[in-house]
Amino acid sequence: MNLRLAAALWLVVAASPRPVWALDAAAGKVDITPNLKTERTWMAGFGATGRKPRGVQDPLYARLVVLREGNTTVALVGLDLLGFYRNDVVELRRLAGYDVPGRSLFLSSTHTHSGPDTLGLWGPFIGISGINAKYHARILARIAESLKLLESQLRPASAAGGHGTLDPRGLCRDSRDPQIIDPNLSVLKLTGLDGKPIATVVNWSCHAEVLGPENRLITADYPGPLCGRVEEKTGGACLFLNGPIGGLMTPDTKIENFYESYRIGAAVADAALALKTSPSPKRPLSYRSELIRVPVENSRYRMFLFALTYGHRLLDKDGTPLPAYKRWSLTLKAILWGLNENDEPWVDSEVAVVDAGPARLLGLPGEAFPEVVIGGYDGKFTFGRPLITPDNPNPPDVSKAPKGPYLRDLVKAPAPMVVGLANDELGYMIPGYDFKLSPHRWMLPRLPGHHYEETNSIGKSVTPIVVDAATKLLKESK
């Protein structure tokens, strides 16, 4: 009788319609490697000009996860590229149909320094774009097409997440004082009802630059073997989301080669798969974002506004689009005399929060310093290094550093993920107390100590603007 009753109950459950809030998921990847025979390519990431590639070491991918719960659909996109500007993200949303209510797209770049120029900053000469327009249009179309295909492959799924601490020694180090490294490693596992993995989402923080400026082979750097290892071990897809990598978080290697790239990727993958995960607490699938407006304060950027407009509309402080001619007139004025506050151009960007089961993703539109996210001014994240290097000629005064709570404290979830280069790339986000640069328009000579990042930040104001928007979103989240 017990067996008959159990069988009858199983038939009732199996025949019952799924609740509208049940999670569906699908995942895949699409090759976005440039064709070096037909698509002229300049490699991005180092110096002021691009590098001509000599070949392809390993493919570049757009890694995709589509989630649906009731009337809400969220696509997570990870690109093996240095970065993607807001204009491109908006265009991809339009092409893929994620620009309407209830449908949202969250995109992040792995920040490989051995991929094609997609930001227009690494061409054959300083100030000349290295973007191949045909390649750019091709990958946008392929990603959009793949996202649409994945929607037809959605299937019931369960989600489990967790996080832990990964000792960065031998994996990632901080090249700028104060020595603060974010050790957080988070994972979100999506599994079909048949028990087979659909996708694993991994969040960890380090520049994808194991291969340095001498490399001339296209490669995804360590995120490639990281995802390859996860896919090999699980049989499902993998999406890697880089974290707060400013500071500058760089691979802890003694030599630049592909073996080291594989070693770091495999180590992070194995640690992620070993994390304990939990399916709860489960929040409804959601996407929330805050539009931000940021001034272009970087004097070098102002002298190359014609390049910056590739990825952003130039606005005045009130959000009114500037006439097209101003990208040239303001550039000329910036070169000859500099711009005053009244002439200052602005751009729009966004900060976003995604809830997916036990995971909460906070998306920041650039490369935040770890201390902006986790604090650590008391030395608890130095991992054996002095907080301030003894021979630093211009050390930061950490007594002036901001107090907590910090953003990580507000991302409350079993799988907390702070994602960098999310939906835009505004450069480095530096704590205001240590933002130091030469007053000269060319930012030269660079100040003593390590202050490279200031020259590749949109400006000092971006950090408080982003932090305020993120704090608001996180405090509004339940």
Image (cartoon, rainbow, N blue to C red):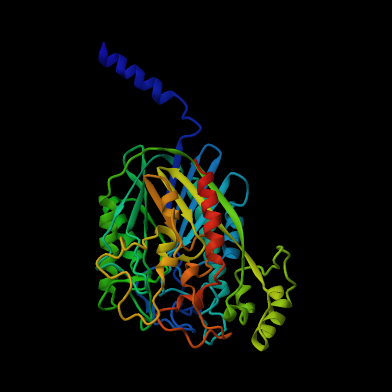
Q: How many numbered marks are there? A: 0
Query: Is residue 42 shown above or below 137?
Result: below
* Camera-nearest residue between 22 and 345: 345
Q: Is residue 167 visible?
A: yes
Please state if 272 lies on the left or on the right of 433 as rendered: left
Direction from residue 327 to residue 471 in the image, left or right: left
Give whichever of 448, 211 is nearer the camera. Answer: 448
In this rendering, is residue 315 above or below 239? below
Q: Quadrant of the N terminus?
A: top left
Is residue 172 or residue 310 the one in the foreground? 172
Residue ID at (27%, 45%): 276
Residue 259 on image: x %, y % = 25, 72
Q: Position of residue 281 (x, y in %)?
A: 39, 37
Camera-nearest residue between 151 and 163: 163
Residue 250 sits in which quadrant?
bottom left
* Residue 153 placement (x, y as % from top left): 46, 45
Q: Position of residue 43 (x, y in %)?
A: 45, 78
In the drawing, does residue 363 fall left or right of residue 306? left
**Residue furthest front in the image:** 399
Q: In the picture shown, does residue 430 fall above or below 156?
A: below
Q: Residue at coordinates 48% horizontally, 30% vertically from top-left? A: 19
Q: Is residue 39 visible?
A: no
